[in-house]
Amino acid sequence: MTTTPSSRSCQSSSTSTAPRLWLKQPLAIFTGNQQDARGGLVVQGSTIVELIAADSQPTGPVDQIWDARRHVLLPGLINTHHHLYQTLTRAFPPALNKRLFPWLQTLYPVWARLQPQMLHAATQLGIAELLLSGCTTVADHHYLFPQALTEAIDIQVDAASSLGARLMLTRGSMSLGQEQGGLPPQTTVQDEDTILADSERVIKRYHQHGAGSQVQIALAPCSPFSVTPQLMKDSAALARQYGVRLHTHLAETLDEDAFCLRTLGKRPLDYLASVDWLGEDVWLAHGIHFNDEEVQELGRQRMGIAHCPSSNMILASGICRTRELEAAGVHVGLAVDGSASNDGSNMIAEVRQALLINRLRYQADEVTHLDALRWATQGSARVLGRDDIGELAAGKQADVACFTLDELRFSGAHDPLAALVICGAQQADAVMVGGQWRVQQGQLLDLDVTALRQRHQQQARLIAQAS
């Protein structure tokens, strides 16, 4: 099985001898930092070395020029929360039109049948979709470890190795099955010693520190209703011992609030405080149903929220309080969530959804297309604790998504950045990760998409057969 170098620092591969590539004179560019880069940017090795102002030239010689006059350039989009295995159960009839808890109870027995080859195909397909949508960093929350799938993180690292996207793989966990009052069936839970031992193993084996990291690991008990308080505490202690981040679902639905009050005697955020889970190394998926006091506490702790617009709409969970959270000091990023509650893996489409759903909570001049782009780039980078990605600037990683406006949907558009979001871009024309092209002319490089889709569809049929 292909592995990734473990916890040694992963430094930039840029050197003074690497070729200099000028992405020249884009149609429009969103840097995420308001710098003038209308003349484009220069990439050397894995990093951006220079932004070019309008009507200017690079300060030094360049070896190659990539004509960007047809392209809108963005920092590579960053997906802060996903469940890649769920690409196998999209539009699954028994789970349609259900609220979160019944939806989970319907799907858990199906997901309990996950096999290694299923997860491998699902991981590849989801990451491929994301890359094609301009996404260069993928955070995946995998918490299902049935007996046939005890090395799920290893499988995901192997599946992703040929695609080139950056990964934040969270070693999830569930220890409370239905016999202990939890939602998951017993076949999907593990004992806590096993969970902690494997968590330590994958951190040591795969986590990379430092700028340019390609694979990082976080610890991610699934939710307050699927693990014990002791596992929450032990996971936090282990993560902080090794300097990795913590992640979980929280405040997604009102049912979850009621469950926590009934079974734990606390609201979800108070419960996190009781198990040592407040801090700037923690990010939470959804974060919809926080009251005013909780919003302020999240801000004081400098925590992160993965805002999941499409999933929240499909499950009718509610609308995240993005403006109040950011005003309090919370980092807000964007996420597609799992492909059984979205049911796709398209980050540029999620940017548009983020704009639209926030217009239902706020006025039209209070949340703009630039806010939605910022959440998907700089905001998401901060949620994941990274300062080397999420914007286009000298010294940052050369993660760049390039879109054209050549489709009928864009005809008549006057502001290219606004058009990208409001007119509904669906796919990037070119995508670069760490200075390496991973998508060109709308096609993934070095991947047979037809063969992958056939293999994935076969695995999807297999997992559904016993339903």
Image (tube, rainbow, N blue to C red):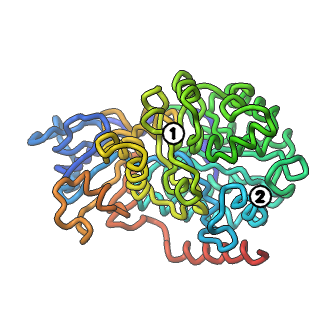
Quadrant of image for the N terminus: bottom right
Q: Please name which of the two marks, 2 or 1, marks the residue nearer to the observer.
A: 2
Crowdedness of circle 2 by 10 Å Cα count: few (<14), some, many (20+)? many
The answer to which quarter of the image holds residue 419 is bottom left
The furthest residue to the right: 179
**Residue 69 location, x and y as percent?**
17, 56
**Residue 449 location, x and y as percent?**
49, 72
Q: As displayed, is residue 297 above or below residue 244? A: above
21 or 406, nearer to the observer: 406
- Tell me the tag on residue 381: none
Q: Residue at x 69, y 36 (%)?
A: 204
How many numbered badges does the structure rendering display? 2
**Which residue type does callout 2 highlight?**
Leu
Q: As displayed, is residue 208 above or below residue 410? A: above
Q: Which SS class for mark 1? A: loop
Q: Which SS class for mark 2? A: helix
Q: Are marks 2 and 1 in contact (CB under 8 Å)?
A: no
- Tell me the tag on residue 213: 1
Mark 2 vs mark 1, CA separation in Å? 26 Å
**Residue 94 location, x and y as percent?**
70, 72
**Residue 210 location, x and y as percent?**
51, 31
Q: Which of marks 2 and 1 is nearer the N terminus?
A: 2
The answer to which quarter of the image holds residue 256 is top right
The answer to which quarter of the image holds residue 292 is top right
Q: Residue at x 63, y 39 (%)?
A: 247
Residue 398 visible in the shown view: no
Kindly identify which residue carries mark 2: 149
Q: As displayed, is residue 305 above or below residue 310? A: above
The furthest residue to the top: 300
**Which residue type does callout 1 highlight?**
Ser
